[in-house]
Image (cartoon, rainbow, N blue to C red):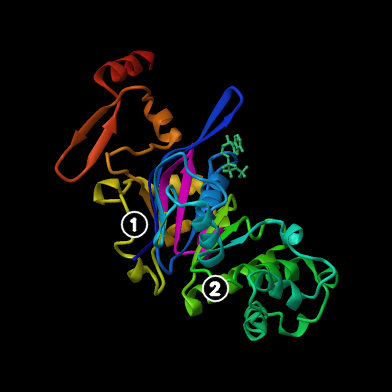
Amino acid sequence: MEMIRCEGMVKIYKTDDVEVVALQGLNLNVRQGEMMAIIGNSGSGKSTLLNILGGLDRPSAGQAHVGKWNLLKMTKEQLIAYKRETVGFIWQNNARNLIPYLTALQNVELPMLIQGKVDRAFAKQLLSAVGLEHRMGSRLTQLSGGEQQRVAIAIALAGRPQLLLADEPTGSVDSATGEQIFEIFRRLNAEMGVTIVIVTHDLSVADRVDRVVAIRDGLTSTEWIRREGGETGSLAGVVHGVGEAGEMESAGAAIAQAAVGFGSRHEQYVVIDHIGRLQIPKEYLESMNVGGKAVLSFDGRRVTIGPSEEQREEEGEGV
Ligand SMILES: Nc1ncnc2c1ncn2[C@@H]1O[C@H](COP(=O)(O)OP(=O)(O)OP(=O)(O)O)[C@@H](O)[C@H]1O
């Protein structure tokens, strides 16, 4: 079952006389219980997407559903209920969301208190789940950055969300702590069935999740699916808008230049939307010397894109 369904999602930021199209018809489907990552350069639209999924911002157009909720049509009251019941949010710098003079346990209980129902046993269970059972009574100021980040994960789970959104969750911690945080994500995912979406520009996350989707210019452009390991089978059929024709012949080349560490462990796909649009990596276009127009041919199994005769002649003359 799908947890997230975004189709043709558009987000336009309007400021006085400038309009920024941050998402320009983005498609994204995430299966319930999946743990996946969204990567992309600065400004590609990752945070915009996450803010929309987290109910902090609304899309301008298109379709966006999370569980039973329609993100475009929710009333203010529904949005509050959605944020409380369905999603949990983790930011890179969580210190701003934690109360320094309260203990770890009090910090986890605070959102419960605000909602009128403190469940101490559950708060303790969450802190144990993130490996802080022996630090529950410590004030936040007595905890390391990594430990504070783990308290933040426990807080994000206090409302028993079905979906956990993490924006650069390991951005401000050392690599050992980062590893620990991913271990916690994996356990929450496996044991509690929480769907996890991680936004990052760190390409090494690819090794730690089942699927990586790349965003470029506000569109999902490429995706990698883990090839080996037990989970691969269960991922079959999850990918939306990706067919055989989308499988890239020269995936190896793109992987090599796109990602250290993706190696042979991931299968790369290009994302094709419902009306057949796809993004071709800039390097491919440059090395083919194709721009503006190209020749498309289909041999019954594969689609090939190449320069027109005119362009080939031009190239030939140049040599
Ligand atoms: N509130 C806003 N008002 C106007 N433009 C915005 C606003 N928020 C984001 N943008 C613009 O939208 C585009 C996408 O921004 P977004 O923050 O989603 O990118 P990102 O991929 O998360 O980048 P980063 O990795 O740097 O956080 C950028 O061009 C950005 O300048």
Query: Toward which corner of the image does residue 155 lie, by quadrant?
Result: bottom right
Q: Which residues are magenta?
A: 205-223
Is 127 in front, or is 69?
A: 69
Query: Label 1 amino acid?
Result: Val
Q: CA separation, marks 1 and 2? A: 26 Å
**Image quadrant where one finds the N terminus:** bottom left
Element at label 2 = loop
| Residue at horizontal 53 percent and vertical 72 percent from the top | 186
Cβ–Cβ under 8 Å for marks 1 and 2: no
Estimate how packed mark 2 is, as few (under 14), some (14 to 19) or many (20 or more) residues with alpha carbons within 10 Å. some
Q: Which residue is mark 1?
A: 239
Residue 117: x and y, percent?
63, 77
Residue where numbered disc 2 is placed: 160
Q: Nearer the viewer, residue 293 or 89?
A: 89
Dot 1 or dot 2: first in sequence order is: 2
Is 68 rendered above or below residue 110? above
Q: Position of residue 123 (x, y in %)?
A: 66, 80
Foreground disc of the pair 1, 2? 2
Question: Compared with residue 23, is residue 202 higher up or lower down, i.e. above or below?
Answer: below
Tell me what residue is drawn at x 68 percent, y 67 percent. Answer: 152
Residue depicted at x 40% and y 72%: 231
Say whether residue 123 is magenta: no
The quadrant of the picture occupied by the C terminus is top left
**Picture coordinates of residue 209 (x, y %)?**
49, 64
Residue 286: x, y in percent? 43, 28
Give the numbered dot on residue 185.
Answer: none
Residue 24 lies in what quarter of the image?
top left
